[in-house]
Structure formats: C-alpha cells, structure tokens
Image (cartoon, helix red, strand yellow):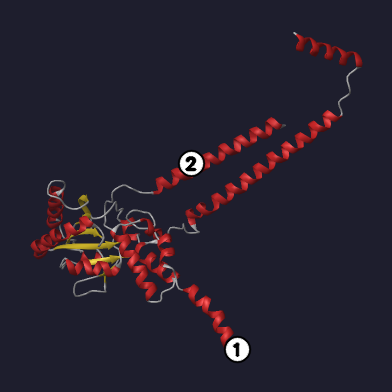
Amino acid sequence: MLAVLVLALALAPATRAAAPNAADLEAEIVCPVCKSTLDQSNAEVAQRMKAYIRQRIAEGASERQIKDELVDQFGPNVIAEPPKKGFDILAWALPVGAAAIGAAAVGAVAWTWSRRGRADAAASEREEPLEPEHERAVDDALGAFEDG
Amino acid sequence: MALTARRATQALTLVAVAALLGLLVWKITQRDATPLAGLAPSRPLELLNTPDKGSDLSITDLRGKAIVVNFWASWCIPCKDETPFLQRVYERHKDDGLVILGIDNEDLREDAIRFLDRYGVTYPAVYSKGTSSAREWRLTGYPETFFVDRSGRLVGERIQGAVDIERNREAFDEGVRLVLESDAPSS
C-alpha cells in the first residue's frame, strides 16, 4: 500500500510535467504572416493557431505532437528555434564559436598583460641606484623647478 | 613580436567578418525570386472539396484544361474578397474547359475546409502542407494567381494580390483568354 502511494506520488509530477503549457508553446511558434511568435501577434492566423494549440492540449496532445502537426501544416519555419541541421546550424554554432574565440582572446590579452607587468616589475627591481652626484643633481633640479 | 601578433589578430578578424558577409550574401542569393516559366509545377495535393474530396489532384491530372491557379489561405483577408469573384469566373467558363485550382497553403486544414464551405466554393481546392508548393511556384504572397494553358505551360502574367478592377483586372482577363484559347496537347 505504501509502495503504491510512493509510486503514485513519484509519478504525479511527471504526469503534470507532460501536459504542455499553451503560453510556452505560443512563445516557440511563429505566426506565418507577421513572422513574430504567437504570443507577440494578434494577426488572425495567430489567433487561430493559438486556439488550435489550446484545443490540442485539451485533447491530450503532447508538445512534440502539437509542434509536429504545426510544422506539417505550416512548414518548418513555424518553429521559432532554428533547426540544428543544414545552413541553420550556423545559428547555433556561430555564437558558441564567437564566445569561444572571445574567451580565448580575453585570456590571451590578460596573459600578455600580466606577463608584461611581471617583466616591468622585475626590470624596475633590477634598476641600479643613482650615483650620489647624480642624485644630488636631480634633487637640485627639482628644487630649482619647485622654487621657480 | 607583439606587432606580428596584433597584425595576425587583425587579419583573422577581417577574415572572420568577410566570411560572415560571404555567408549572408550566399544565403540571400539562394532565394530565387525570378518568376516561373515553362511547365507549371505539378505536385499531387489533397483535394479539400468536390466529390473526390480526400484524393490527390495535380496539374498533370488537369492536362487539356485551361487552368487558373489561385494560392490562398483562410486567414488571408484579400482572399475573402477575391474568392466569390473566382467562383463566378469558374461558373461562367467551366463549360469552356476552364478550371480554377485553389491551392491552400500555410493554413490550418480545418480552417481551409470551413472557408470553402462558407464561400460556397465548387471549383477544386487542394491543401498544400508546409511551404514546398510556395517554393516551387516562387510565391510572393497571398493571394497569388497563375495561368496554366491546356498543355501545362505557364502563360500570361501572374497576379500578385487579389484581382482588382483598377489594378490588374486586364491582366487577369488576358490570362483567362490565353488559357482558354490555348491548344490542347497533341498526345
């Protein structure tokens, strides 16, 4: 009895999660007239597509089924997310590639700067102190500059 | 050394920008916007009305007929204005061998059927899934009308938008005349 209750409790969230959310789907489906997502569109076809989504959810269709049916009727461009194949894969690959190149560039610049900083510090540590007469000459020049 | 690295970075950046621009140009030029000519596309599509509802119909099946192909969608407002006019043209010329073939595209199938019922469409209307037909016909919008002669060749001028007395009625009438007067295929 307890095992059945535990199983039922474990399955309950999964069952709820399987029912698609109309608002989520409307944000992922594109209106073929205005090319914006359904949640952003008031075009007649968008209203009809929203009604279709709600009707299919009420009939127990899954998110995958609803998307497949809409692609079947309106074509692949009805899905806002670009497909992960053909030319469209660039929409996925380019941002990742650009982020990787950007991160590498930032790393390289940071590494160069830190190396240059260390080299400068080492060089300044290696600097010989001034000869006493030179130091006196500098002090005199600075004093003259401040006075006059 | 630092100068070489900077030049290399600049060169790489330029190459990357040029490659992206190249991709953009390539993608844009892939879209073929030139009007169709020659034989009309003939993909079999599901009939939504007429006694043969549910069976497939293609342009090839209509060879020998004078065909006016009209792309429409139930959500398209100019299509609602144009459909009664097309129905009247069909009724006037169907005995001369004229067929109006409505191709419903980018639409919910059930909405398309309701549209045909509401406007009392009796000319054959087919349902095109997805965007394949739109690509084949190089469609620019809805409604759009083409003329296909009795041997299956595109003739006349395509009508972009609804047929309108002031804007394109002459071109429409000329298209209808061309298909009606065309010769039937010899075979």
Looking at the rendered structure, the secondary structure element under dot 2 is: helix
- Visible residue check, residue A93: yes
- Visible residue check, residue B106: no
**Position in image of residue B115 (x %, y %):** 21, 66
Looking at the rendered structure, the secondary structure element under dot 1 is: helix
Q: Amino acid at mark 1?
A: Leu
Q: Which one is in front, B46 or B17?
A: B17
Q: For residue A2, which numbered disc appears in the image?
A: 1
What chain is tagged by disc 2?
A: B
Residue marked by disc 2: B21
Q: Which one is in front, B152 or A7?
A: A7
Check if mark 1's residue and mark 2's residue have beta carbons within 8 Å.
no
**Given the current orientation, which residue lies at the most extreme top position?**
A148
Q: Is residue A66 left or right of residue B69?
A: right
**Could you say which quadrant of the image residue B150 lies in?**
bottom left
Label 1, label 2: how far apart the Cα atoms are: 64 Å
Q: Is residue B63 left or right of residue A124?
A: left
Q: In this picture, is A121 found above or below B73?
A: above
- For image coordinates 14% across by 61% down, the residue present is B84
**Position in image of residue B123 (x %, y %):** 17, 66
Q: Which one is in front, B34 or B28?
A: B28
- For image coordinates 16% across by 48% down, the residue present is B168
Q: Amino acid at mark 2?
A: Leu
Q: Is residue B179 left or right of residue B71?
A: left
**Position in image of residue A110 (x %, y %):** 70, 40
**Could you say which quadrant of the image residue A40 lies in?**
bottom left
